[in-house]
Amino acid sequence: MNIQIIGTKKCKDTQKVERFFKDRSIKYHFADLKERGISVGELNKISSGRDPEDLINKNSVTFKKKNFIYMDYNPLEEILEHPDLLVTPIIRSGNRVIIGFDQKAIKSLIEE
């Protein structure tokens, strides 16, 4: 099982997911959005089959500072420009993608 966690080191939910895998001795790869951002291909895989608007963290500082609530915008374009708009953590394993800390979905992922 090849697991990738995409998030930021300061995100509490990302820290919970890391702890979840460490407590179960499950290896994972951590990708820090602050350090490397997100590629177009990666974003397309994450957003596949989802409403891109659901990927936007409406409580993020960037969302509030840029006043996105009052604007029409393309969520995918804005995420590429401002990766900190993404809801984190994002957990990827094969074709499965989990957005946010969803313990049931994570347990289901590791039981496969």
Image: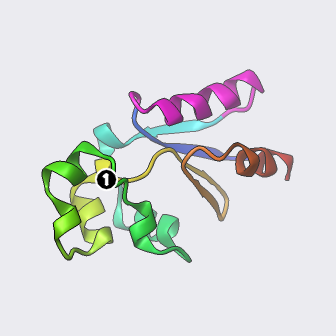
Q: Does the magenta stretch include residue 20?
A: yes
Nearest to the observer: residue 70 or residue 10: 70
Which residue of the protein is positioned furthest toward the right in this rendering?
Answer: 111
85, 45: nearer the viewer:
85
Structure colour scheme: rainbow
Q: In which quarter of the image is residue 22?
A: top right
Q: Residue at x 13, y 55 (%)?
A: 66
Q: Residues within 10 Å of mark 1 (few under 14, many from 20)?
A: many
Q: Where does label 1 land, which residue?
A: 85
Task: Relative to 14, say whether 94 is above or below.
Answer: below
Relative to 77, is 45 on the left or the right? right
Expressed as whole percent of the image width and height from the top left, the position of residue 24 reads 77, 27
- Residue 87 image point, x, y percent: 43, 51
Residue 106 lies in magenta, yes or no? Answer: no
Which residue appears at 73% of the width and 22% of the height?
Answer: 23
Point 47% across, 30% down: residue: 12
Percent across and percent down for residue 105 are 72, 52
Judge left or right: residue 96 versus residue 15: right
Residue at 78% of width from left, 44% of height from top?
A: 107
Q: Residue furthest top?
A: 23
What is the chief secondary structure element of the magenta stretch?
helix
Segment tinted magenta in the rendering: 9-27
- Badge count: 1
Q: Residue furthest front?
A: 70
Image height of 27 relative to 3, above or below: above
Residue type marked 1:
Leu
Q: Is residue 30 above or below residue 4?
A: above
Circle 1 — which element? Answer: helix
**Quarter where residue 21 is shown:** top right
Q: In this view, does 14 lie to the left or right of 20?
A: left
